[in-house]
Image (cartoon, grey):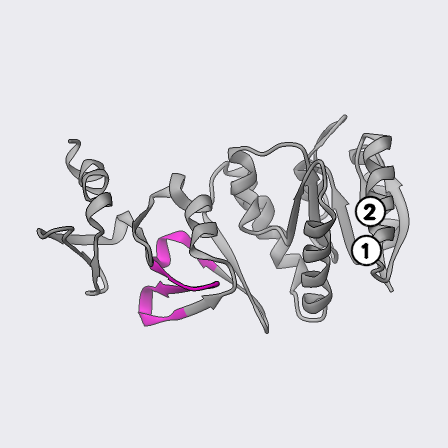
Amino acid sequence: MIKAIIIDDEVNARNTLKVFLGATNKPIEIIGEADDISTGIKLIRNSEPDLIFLDIKLKSGTSFELLAQLPNISAEIIFVTAYDNYAIRAFQMAAFGYLLKPIQISELNQVLDRFEKAKTSMQLPQHTKILIENFDQHSVKKLVIQNVNGFKVVPLEDIFYLQGEVNYTRLFLQGGEKVMTSRTLKDYETFLVDFGFFRIHQSHLINLSHVKEYIKGDGGEIVMNNGQHLNLSRRRKQQFLSRFLGK
């Protein structure tokens, strides 16, 4: 049985989530509810849940103020929020799950399926620490790449480029390391476009800080600092050049 709590300052939102959770037929027991930071902290400490459904904006502050006071939390976080903006991308890269209100039961089922598969291997305290760090800095500094063995923390500065492979993405890192993740390249493009990354081709998303050289051509070639040559699509050529040449 999965022990879960709900922290949300709207009674109707908590009740709706409970109904939806019951409809999933997952082995979940709601062991408590809270509506602000202080009651949320007390509930987490006293109940030691496996899973926390957490609204971002509470009446007494933000959920990140709550998490900052629980550095060794041993539960996974699933955000349930109506806010779909820049700040979400800053923590979505580290949060286990994220649901946008109004909740879709199909999305709820998906995130619960992932939790059931991952709960025995996730190193939760470090996972939450990265989440808080990303939010406090108001920018993404690190990615949490989940895999079958748990997860790997990757600083953005260590990524040369990402390569899409159908429903997977391979990250090429400093030192020649490669990391595979089940997120799509489109997911990463959405997350990282504001943090110095650029989609140069259907298959590649590059870290602009690691561009070494551009070679002219129909679209052209981009040489990365690790020596890799990557094709630049013709339709993305002008936008790419404008990032460096301002034209």
Residue on which the image places disc 2: 20
Horizontal placement of 65 versus 227: left or right? right
Q: Quadrant of the C terminus?
A: top left
Q: Where residue 106 appears, x then y in whole percent?
A: 70, 51
Bounds of the magenta span?
154-178
Image point 76% across, 26% down: which residue? 59
Residue on which the image places disc 1: 24
Front residue of this view, candidates 222 and 209: 222
Q: Is residue 92 magenta?
A: no
Q: Where residue 222 appears, x then y in whole percent?
A: 18, 55
Horizontal placement of 246 versus 118: left or right? left
Front residue of this view, candidates 60 and 149: 149
Image point 74% across, 42% down: which residue? 54
Query: Which secondary structure, mark 1?
Result: loop
Q: Where residue 80 appears, x then y in whole percent?
A: 71, 41
Snapshot quadrant of residue 159: bottom left
Q: Up-down: is 236 above or below 110?
A: above
> What is the three-letter code of the residue carrying label 2?
Phe
> What is the three-letter code of the residue carrying label 1?
Thr
Q: Up-down: is 167 above or below 68?
A: below
Image point 55% across, 38% down: which residue? 136
Snapshot quadrant of residue 195: top left
Number of other residues with Cα within 10 Å of mark 1, as a class: few under 14, some 14 to 19, many 20 or more: some
- Tell me the distance, in whole angstroms, between the alpha carbons under discs 1 and 2: 7 Å
The reply to whether discs 1 and 2 touch (Cβ–Cβ < 8 Å) is yes
Front residue of this view, candidates 212 and 134: 212
Q: Quadrant of the N terminus?
A: bottom right
Q: Where residue 209 appears, x then y in whole percent?
A: 27, 48
Q: Up-down: is 186 above or below 33?
A: below
What is the count of numbered marks? 2
